[in-house]
Image (cartoon, grey):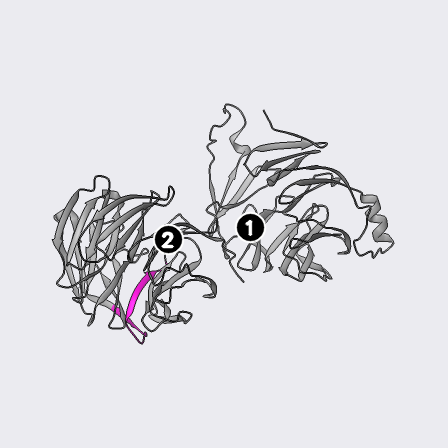
Amino acid sequence: MPLRLNIRRKLTSRSDRVKSVDLHPDEPWMLCSLYNGTVHMWNWQSQTLLKTFEVTELPVRSSKFIARKQWIVTGADDLNVRVFNYNTMEKIKTFEAHSDYLRHVAVHPLLPYVVTCSDDMTIKIWDWEKNWDCKQVYEGHSHYVMQVVFNPKDPNTFASASLDRTIKVWGLNSAQPHFTLEGHEKGVNCIDYFAGGDKPFLISGADDSTVKIWDYQSRNCVQTLTDHTQNVSCVAFHPDLPVIITGSEDGAVRIFHSGTFSLENTLNYGMERVWSIACRKGSNRVGLGYDEGSAIIKMGKEQPVASMDQSSGKIIWAKHNEVQMVNVKGAGADGFVDGERIPLQVKELGNCEVYPQSLRHDPKGRVAVVCGDGSYIMYTALAWRTKSYGNALEVVWSPQGDYATREGPTKVKLFRDFKERHTLALDFNVDAIFGGAMLACRSGQEFVFFYDWETGAPVRRIDATVKNVFWNDSALLCCIASDTALFVLQYDKEAVALYLEQAGNEDDGCEAAFEPLYEVGERVSTGRWVGDCFVYTNSNERLNYVVGGGGERPH
């Protein structure tokens, strides 16, 4: 099932061929190494070119930030490594590193080391605290060494990719490789380590147009991806999101699920061959380097999914697969000034087996359900123990604790006490469901149909473009939010009960189920009923409320 990550392009810069890109770990900066010998530093937030480093007249194939020193380090076809202060643009150091073109530079995450690899078939480690002394030379490849990458789980080891069709894994203190991975039919251009979870995975891309995922403990290939049609030039495991990103000379960037290896999306921005991919831990922005420039894309939302139990004040949220909890009521209400940040003690609950795309408490606050990857898992809210699981794109609750799952466009099921009770008889496609006093099933931009939780019978169809449905606690008022307005309806329980008792079968359901009360011409971003007052944020993120048809903004 798809991840449903919304992907948007946040920056596009046209330039000469970009051979590598890197993202600063803290600042909104992207470093682009150009074939014409320059390095550009972009601010992707302000969409501005911050600095241009005139490095050499030959191609710069790799450059990296060394944030803890406020440096950038570059490797070029003139055989030299150069180091610049990225604030002052002062050149700190230049030295000849290899006897042939430099293909890649990598920075050790902790130690003062830079690793370089070259067409001279060697790998070298340089210690900047010892005036860039060469600490170690690694020999063993029989063709150009294209890339080196440190293992984030064990930074004392690193891997290298070579056109001799192999991947070798090395240690910092030994000139001999620990082992060699073989399986590609042509030269290997790129590699990356899997940073998340427990899986000991390494990914590689090669001139045989394939991407391979390796288990570096068993030293076996666990999956081969054959979606590209030309040489694979760059690969990346995203450090936070459950995705593999690959780029090729076919011009496509492909995104795969790192758990199932299924193809999730293909991006083609018409900028010719793809040469480089850069990810940043803690961010969902990804840098891309092409023949005709560079781009920044944003994958999904950076905000964690969250849910609050209204009675206890406990908030559970999931950022990627990690789940945490705080108790808002535990902070007390005294001594705080409006706008002040409240210090809260965070409790680690555990991890999700799926990548969370939504999280909701049940009405009693005892259970929380996580949806993602086409599945749902229900956990006990306090101990975070698995209570139930199954297939679903989304799960919603009734006020009594029943719940409904949407497995696909024509399959919606009702549950009580974790046991299936009904499957709705649907003659239309459902793209979203909403909980509350009645279950609402939306069919695209056309209408929403309300169903009775107890019997699963259809109650009322309303023709509207629905974004969300909100019920108040008494189940007498219902707010339907559309793209342009909110509509408040009064619900008639007695009329619906009579309609169901008489087994009504009208095309549009029970006409007396809802009576329109008022309409407000604003788009609702988030909303909640407090008694008979509907409080909401509008499209400008302003907090408003409406009672009896009159809209107000809190003072």
Q: In this view, does 165 lie above or below 290?
A: below
Which corner quadrant holds the C terminus? top right
Q: Quadrant of residue 234?
A: bottom left
Residue 358: assigned label: 1
Q: Which residue lies furthest to the right in this view?
A: 502
- Residue 216 visible in the snapshot: no
Q: What residue type is labelled 2?
A: Ala
Q: Seen in the image, is 252 located left or right of residue 311?
A: left
- Magenta span has 186? yes
Q: Quadrant of residue 123?
A: bottom left
- Residue 211 visible in the snapshot: yes
Q: Nearer the viewer, residue 291 or 60?
A: 291
Q: Where is residue 415 in the image (x, y as percent from the top left)?
A: 68, 56
The span picked out in magenta is 179-194
- Magenta span has 181? yes
CA separation, marks 1 and 2? Answer: 29 Å
* Badge nearest the viewer, 1 or 2: 2
- Name the residue at 47% across, 35% down: 344
Q: Nearer the viewer, residue 392 or 251?
A: 251
Q: Which numbered disc, 1 or 2, marks the residue that appears first in the sequence?
A: 2
Residue 314: assigned label: none
Q: Which amino acid does label 1 sit on?
A: Ser
Q: Where is residue 525 in the image (x, y as percent from the top left)?
A: 58, 41
Q: Seen in the image, is 87 located left or right of residue 349?
A: left
Residue 295: assigned label: 2
Q: Where is residue 205 in the image (x, y as percent from the top left)?
A: 34, 67
**Labels 1 & 2 near each other (Cβ < 8 A):** no
Q: Residues within 10 Å of mark 2 (few under 14, many from 20)?
A: many
